[in-house]
Image (cartoon, helix red, strand yellow):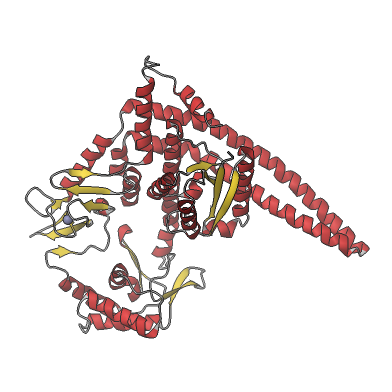
């Protein structure tokens, strides 16, 4: 029986602005692949202008819906590149898990994925690459953004009550007050400052009542959003990045006075329990990210206890369960030390990492050569298309001069098509060029991540720390005083090494000599499904 496939294509908003044909190019390449494989294409799901870091993407949801309703009828889900699917490891794991549940296998046009241990390892590694790449990008962006904030600009999305899309005479991004939203927020902040609204909950309730009544917003303000408003000095006309220690008089419009802002902060302090001081930034508490209390399921958060002469950072359960041996809270140092020990414990054995790395390296050497050839081929095609484009332009001019409008339209249509092809080809070429230049550095970091995640974690800044935690434990971590740390799922790359370990144990009956050549496994694994 002929096998079936659904196709999934995606471009993010930035890619969409830059290279309009990317979606079509992906689809065309996927369709060609299906024809080569002799698969029936059931449906194409197109995601336009959506980031790969989210799971609630409209087309993706439709795809999952479709495969669940057609359980047993869909064999493959085909993407052009794995990072089209998910740039975030936990999301990748989640989606893949659901596909497997419906009996659907994930396939990529440009990467080798199959259910052999090598294929699984490959897929895990690619997901790590994508995530690393994305984190790297966001770090790079923040350097420029940091400069902007130092100049008083705001290169981030507008806070609630403000409008995006304005620039001052020096072309710097500024925000303007959004009417009437800003009037309700201003009133709420001022009322909170003088105690008419007494608690953050009152503040939020007031805002949501005005939303209901005057419809100035589609959705009510969530709890976290209301805190963001209360704690954000942006509303008083400052540009502030607490994690980088930047506080700068801003160039955007202010909503309230600095005096009002300070009164709001004083009242917030009075409101919060005296023992705990709320920290607006959690750079001290990397483990706040996706770490849950095993006893009650609530988040584990970080806080400071104020002693006589110093502040002591500690972690605690949101519900107040015991995290320490006798105490509710556990000191930051103790908690993080336990985390380190746990990571060391779940880390794969060194010899399997070596094997894994060798397999990956072998795979990528081949892949890089392939990509380099692709780039050459694409270059040739681009040049041919450009020649034809020039010829057509000449023909159009000629037809125009001769007054042959029928010919002219014909040539113009052809020109359109060629220009579309040119755009797709250039996109594909760029994709491949980026992959080639990226591999080396990314591979090195990924090797380090597998071999010594703790060293990377300890030396990294808060963003790197969180990225590493997410890579190692995509679903998050659980903790309680008795058991310590635990998780239901470990990173796919790690678990694929485990699969590799199992595979090796099975094989060891046949091939018992040590120093097995990894390259041969790779080749065998790759060919098996072709
Ligand atoms: Zn708890």
Pick out the residue farthest to the front: 1
Residue 290 position (above or below residue 220) = above
Residue 22 shown left or right of residue 399 in the figure: left
Quadrant where the C terminus lies? top right
Residue 431 visible in the picture: yes
Toward the viewer: 45 or 121?
45
What's the residue at 88%, 64% (across, down)?
A: 405
Location of residue 447 (image quadrant): top left
Q: Nearer the viewer, residue 188 or 9?
A: 9
Residue 181 position (above or below residue 369): below
Position of residue 475 in the picture relative to residue 295 (left or right):
right
Residue 406 horizontal/vertical position (percent): 87, 62
Query: x, y percentage for residue 372?
Result: 60, 36
Ligand 1 location (quadrant): bottom left
- Identify the image quadrant of residue 262: bottom left
- Seen at 38% across and 40% down, the residue is 492
């Amino acid at each position: 029986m002929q096998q079936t496939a659904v196709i999934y294509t995606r471009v993010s908003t930035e890619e969409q602005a830059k290279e309009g044909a990317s979606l079509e190019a992906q689809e065309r390449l996927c369709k060609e692949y299906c024809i080569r494989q002799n698969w029936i294409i059931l449906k194409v799901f197109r995601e336009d202008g959506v980031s790969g870091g989210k799971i609630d993407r409209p087309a993706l949801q439709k795809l999952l819906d479709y495969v669940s309703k057609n359980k047993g009828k869909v064999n493959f889900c085909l993407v052009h590149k794995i990072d089209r699917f998910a740039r975030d490891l936990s999301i990748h794991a989640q989606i893949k898990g659901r596909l497997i549940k419906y009996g659907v296998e994930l396939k990529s046009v440009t990467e080798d994925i199959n259910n052999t241990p090598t294929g699984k390892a490959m897929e895990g590694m690619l997901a790590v690459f994508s995530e690393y790449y994305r984190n790297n990008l966001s770090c790079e962006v923040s350097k420029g953004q940091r400069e902007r904030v130092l100049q008083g600009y705001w290169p981030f999305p507008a806070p609630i009550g403000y409008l995006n899309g304005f620039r001052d005479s020096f072309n710097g991004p500024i925000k303007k007050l959004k009417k009437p939203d800003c009037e309700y927020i201003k009133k709420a902040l001022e009322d909170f400052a003088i105690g008419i609204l007494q608690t953050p909950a009152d503040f939020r309730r007031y805002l949501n009542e005005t939303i209901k009544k005057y419809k100035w917003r589609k959705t009510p303000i969530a709890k976290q959003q209301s805190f963001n408003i209360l704690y954000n000095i942006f509303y008083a006309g400052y540009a502030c990045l607490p994690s980088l220690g930047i506080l700068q008089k801003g160039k955007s419009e202010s909503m309230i006075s600095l005096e009002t802002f300070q009164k709001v902060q004083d009242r917030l302090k009075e409101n919060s329990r005296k023992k705990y001081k709320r920290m607006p930034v959690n750079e001290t508490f990397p483990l706040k990210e996706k770490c849950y209390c095993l006893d009650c399921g609530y988040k584990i958060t970080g806080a400071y206890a104020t002693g006589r002469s110093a502040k002591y950072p500690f972690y605690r359960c949101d519900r107040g369960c015991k995290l320490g041996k006798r105490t509710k809270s556990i000191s930051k140092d103790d908690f993080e030390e336990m985390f380190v020990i746990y990571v060391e414990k779940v880390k794969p054995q060194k010899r399997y990492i070596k094997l894994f790395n060798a397999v990956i390296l072998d795979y990528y050497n081949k892949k890089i050569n392939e990509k380099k050839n692709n780039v050459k081929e694409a270059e040739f095609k681009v040049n041919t298309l450009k020649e034809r484009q020039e010829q057509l332009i000449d023909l159009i001019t000629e037809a125009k001069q001769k007054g042959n409008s029928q010919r002219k339209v014909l040539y113009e249509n052809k020109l359109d098509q060629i220009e579309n092809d040119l755009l797709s080809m250039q996109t594909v070429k760029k994709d491949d060029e980026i992959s080639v230049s990226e591999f080396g550095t990314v591979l090195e970091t990924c090797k380090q991540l597998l071999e010594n995640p703790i060293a990377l974690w300890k030396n990294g800044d808060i963003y790197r720390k969180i990225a590493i935690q997410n890579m190692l434990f995509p679903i998050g971590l659980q903790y309680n005083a008795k058991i310590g740390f635990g998780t239901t799922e470990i990173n796919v790359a790690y678990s694929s090494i485990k699969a590799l370990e199992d595979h090796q144990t099975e094989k060891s009956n046949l091939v018992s000599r040590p120093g097995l050549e990894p390259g041969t496994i790779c080749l065998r694994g790759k060919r098996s499904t072709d």
